[in-house]
Amino acid sequence: VRTLLDRSASRLAAKFQDQPAVRASLEHTIAAAYFDLGLYAQSREHALRAVELRKRLLGERDRLTYVSLDRLAMAYRGEGKLA
């Protein structure tokens, strides 16, 4: 599962370059998958990308931006980075 996830994650930027909303959604989904596998650093990386994309596309106060911010917070908590 992890190998497939790693491959998919590495191709996102190039494959969905012209579809930032789709990429943001997939980054968020991959962040959740890594989190569920206990791979918190990888989860954080993808959650951060989802947040950045959604802030740019939807704004800082959009519901989906908040959802990705929550995912990012969960990844930080998983890493023990509570500050």
Image (cartoon, rainbow, N blue to C red):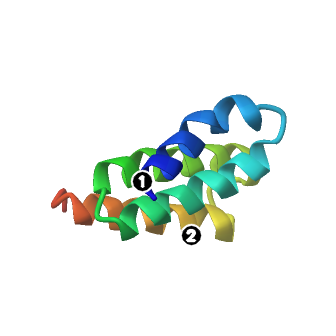
Q: Quadrant of the C terminus?
A: bottom left
| Direction top: furthest residue | 14
**Which amino acid, mark 2?**
Val
Query: Residue 58, percent across and down?
Result: 74, 54
In the image, residue 45 lies at what x, y percent? Answer: 42, 44
How far from the left and from the top, in percent, is residue 12? 65, 39
* Disc number lying in front (2 or 1): 1
Q: Regarding mark 1 in the picture, which secondary structure is present there?
A: helix
Q: Is residue 70 above or below residue 21?
A: below
The answer to whether one can see residue 83 in this image is no
Residue positioned 55% across, 35% down in the render: 10
Q: CA distance from mark 2 to mark 1?
A: 24 Å
On screen, residue 27 above or below 14: below
Q: Is residue 53 left or right of residue 80?
A: right
**Which badge, 2 or 1, comes first in the chain's sequence?**
1
Residue 56 in the image: x percent, y percent? 69, 43
Q: Residues within 10 Å of mark 2 (few under 14, many from 20)?
A: some
Q: Residue at x 70, y 28 (%)?
A: 14
Which of the two residues, 23 or 8, is positioned nearer the viewer here?
A: 8
What amino acid is labelled 1 in the image?
Arg
The residue where tag 1 is placed is: 2
Which residue lies at the image location 30% right of the left edge and 56% below the top edge? 40
Residue toward you, 4 or 39: 4
Q: Are marks 2 and 1 in contact (CB under 8 Å)?
A: no
Q: Looking at this view, name the residue that lies furthest to the right.
A: 18
Callout 2: SS: helix
**Residue assigned mark 2:** 67
- Can residue 81 be seen here? The reply is yes
Which one is nearer the viewer's eye here, 49 or 3?
3
